[in-house]
Amino acid sequence: MTNPVRRVVTGHDASGRAIIQEDGPAPRVQRIGGAIGPLFHEIWNTQATPAPIDAASGEPPEDGIKLAPPKGGTRIRVLDIPPESDELSTMSPEEAQAHFAEVGAGDASAHTGAGSRHAMMHRTETIDYGIVLEGELVLIMDEGETTVRAGDIVIQRGTNHGWSNRSDRICRIAFILIDGAFDADLKR
């Protein structure tokens, strides 16, 4: 098991002074996709843009873990992605879709079978900033791939992609997801 992710939330007291409202581990942590899947540390979400800023309401409530941010909102999470197992190379499109369905995004799965570049290929209507904190991952695109390491930042712009941990240790990556809208020519 990896170290917990610490979340510090600021707010305001009754006099309007800035305070530390919360300080502790991420309140929602869940492994998705069974033993081979990533560990999601859900940090925060907003449900509108601009995001309302009040004294101390806290994070808007959500049920379970959702892949995409709320419509018109944002999400920040940290993922601990384990080294890739052989199970992924034999995963069927239906099994991949079931993994994405666990986070409310079964339709994001782009695994098409034998011709697919990776079982976890997917596409969301979002702009995602991925910041590698520890370890390394291979970012797989429809055409090409690249290895990203601690300190690297990926700007994912609604493209079909997959992540492969080909190393022997967990990769920790932070994602900031922003709701987006595809141009008409990019919609499926």
Image (cartoon, rainbow, N blue to C red):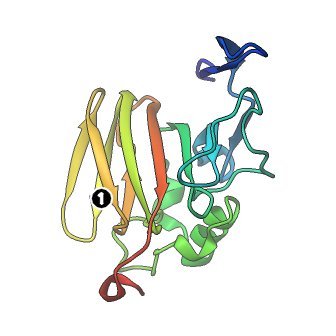
Q: Quadrant of residue 87?
A: bottom right
Q: Is residue 151 left or right of residue 130?
A: left
Residue 46 versus residue 131: which sits nearer the camera?
46
Name the residue beneath numbered marker 1.
140
Name the quadrant of the C terminus. bottom left
The percent position of residue 24, horizontal first and vertical second, equals: 70, 15
Label 1: which secondary element = strand
Residue at image position (71%, 40%) is 30
Left or right of 100, for residue 154? left
Give the residue drawn at x 40%, y 31%.
168
| Percent position of residue 26, x then y | 68, 27
Who is closer to the viewer here, 2 or 24? 24
74 vs 108, nearest the viewer: 74
- Which amino acid type corresponds to the residue marked 1 in the rendered image? Ile
Camera-side residue of 4 and 185: 185
Q: Is residue 135 above or below residue 126?
A: above
Residue 33 rendering spot, x and y as whole percentages: 65, 54
Q: Residue at x 58, y 56 (%)?
A: 69
Task: Find residue 13 and report its horizontal and vertical position in percent.
Answer: 75, 15
Residue 143 lies, with reference to residue 169, above or below; the image says below
Residue found farthest to the front: 15
The image quarter containing residue 144 is bottom left
Tell me the crowding category of disc 1: few under 14, some 14 to 19, or many 20 or more residues within 10 angstroms, Cα based. some
Q: Residue at x 56, y 46 (%)?
A: 75
